[in-house]
Every structure is written in C-alpha cells, then in structure tokens.
Image (spheres, rainbow, N blue to C red):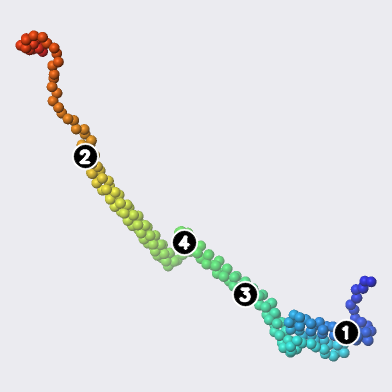
Amino acid sequence: MVRGKTQLKRIENTTSRQVTFSKRRKGLLKKAFELSVLCDAEVALIIFSPRGKLNEYATSSMEDTIERYKRHIKNTDQDSTMPLVDQNAQLQQLKHEAQKMAKKIEQLETSKRKLHGEGLGTCSIQELQKLERQLDRSVSIIRARKMSLYRKQIDQLKEKERTLVAENAMLREKLRLEPRQISNEDNAMVPIVETSEVSDVETALSIGLPEIRNYTLFLQQ
C-alpha cells in the first residue's frame, strides 16, 4: 500500500501538537548530533517550544558558535558592499583620467597645428617667440642627426675605398709577376733543333776521264 504525501500544516489539536513537537524535537537533536559526529561539523541548535521553553544543542559552546556566526554575517555584509563601493570609486577615477587624457590630447593637437603654422592668429608675441625657439631646437636636432648620418656614410665609403685600393694593388702585383712566368715557360717549351751539316753526295754514274767528267758537270751548271 502506497503511503500518501502528508500535508504540512499547523496541528490544531493542542495535545497532538505537543506530542508531535516532542517526537520531532528528539529526532532533530539526534540528526544534529549525527551530523556533528559524522562530518566533524560545528553545530548549534536552538529550539523554543510553543510555551517558550528553550531546547538547545551545541557541539562546543553555544556562545562561541553564536559569536562565530555574527562575525561571519558581518564579514559577508562587508564583502557584499565593498565591491560596489570599489566599483564606484574606480568608475570615478576612470572618468577623471579620461577627462585629463582628453584635455591633454586637445593641447597636443593645438600644439601640432601651431607647429604646422596653423591657428597662429590667437597667439601672443611671447607664444610666437616660444614657438620659434622650439622650432629652432628641432631644426638643430634634425641637422645634427643628418650630419651624423653623413659622417657615418663617409666613413663607410672611405673604408670601402681602402679595401678597393688594396685589392687593386694586389691585382697589379699579380699581373706584374705573371708575364715573367709565362716567358720562362715559353722558353722552356721551345724545342732544341740540332744543326748538322748536310753534304750533297753525287750519286750519278759517269764514264770517262776525270777531267772530261768535271768539264761536263761545269757545263751542266
């Protein structure tokens, strides 16, 4: 059989209400004790009966637990209010800084226009003289930087020139030595021709006296 859900409402019968209170109080005290033992929790339970009788249970001291509760509530209230106060203070500080930044930007824009020669109609003599001195200092700094870059480039070109001169001298020395080596090699490679006297040998066959043969040779020449 399924048990129906009990409707919670005030018990009208005084006797039944007192019996129910007594039973439920004992069960509640038992549950509080079990919770403190099983979970090592600090428990404080205060119950006032319908007649005003006090029933309490505390794992340590009721007064200490109540003081701890008050401190916790106080700290919780401070934690809940402090972020709102800090947030308002931060917003005010951010607004103040934003206003200062906007004013500074406006001043810089005005100064920039004056450096470009714009908006000078409202400037006094002192302001124009100050602006002129500022421009002179800027031009001096720019010229000094330009001369520094020029000197650096000149030093680099001089160093490059010295390197090229050294390479040119080395090439000249190399070209001066190479013709001698080539001439010596050519002389060594010329073949030696042995000269020998070549004598003409007469192999012709002739008949007759030597004088007649010589005369005949003379006529042939």
**Mark 2 vs mark 4, CA separation in Å:** 82 Å
Position of residue 111 measured from the top left corner of the image (x, y, whole percent): 48, 63
Callout 1, which amino acid?
Lys
Q: In which quarter of the image is residue 57?
A: bottom right
Foreground label between 3 and 2: 2
Foreground label between 3 and 4: 3
Callout 3, which amino acid?
Ala
| Earlier sequence position, callout 2 versus callout 4 | 4
Within 10 Å of disc 4 (Cα), the crowding (few <14, some 14-19, many 20+) is: some
- Are the residues flagged by discs 1 and 3 in contact, CB closer than 8 Å? no
**Mark 1 vs mark 3, CA separation in Å:** 55 Å
Q: Which residue is painted at 52% across and 67% down in the image?
A: 104
The disc at residue 23 is: 1
Q: Circle 3 sits on which residue?
A: 89
Within 10 Å of disc 3 (Cα), the crowding (few <14, some 14-19, many 20+) is: few
Res 132 seen here: no
**Mark 2 vs mark 1, CA separation in Å:** 135 Å
Q: Which residue is painted at 62% across and 71% down in the image?
A: 91
| Earlier sequence position, callout 4 versus callout 1 | 1
Disc 1, SS: helix
The disc at residue 184 is: 2
- Are the residues flagged by discs 3 and 4 in contact, CB closer than 8 Å? no
The disc at residue 209 is: none
- Are the residues flagged by discs 2 and 1 in contact, CB closer than 8 Å? no
**Mark 4 vs mark 1, CA separation in Å:** 92 Å
Q: Is residue 113 shown above or below 11?
A: above
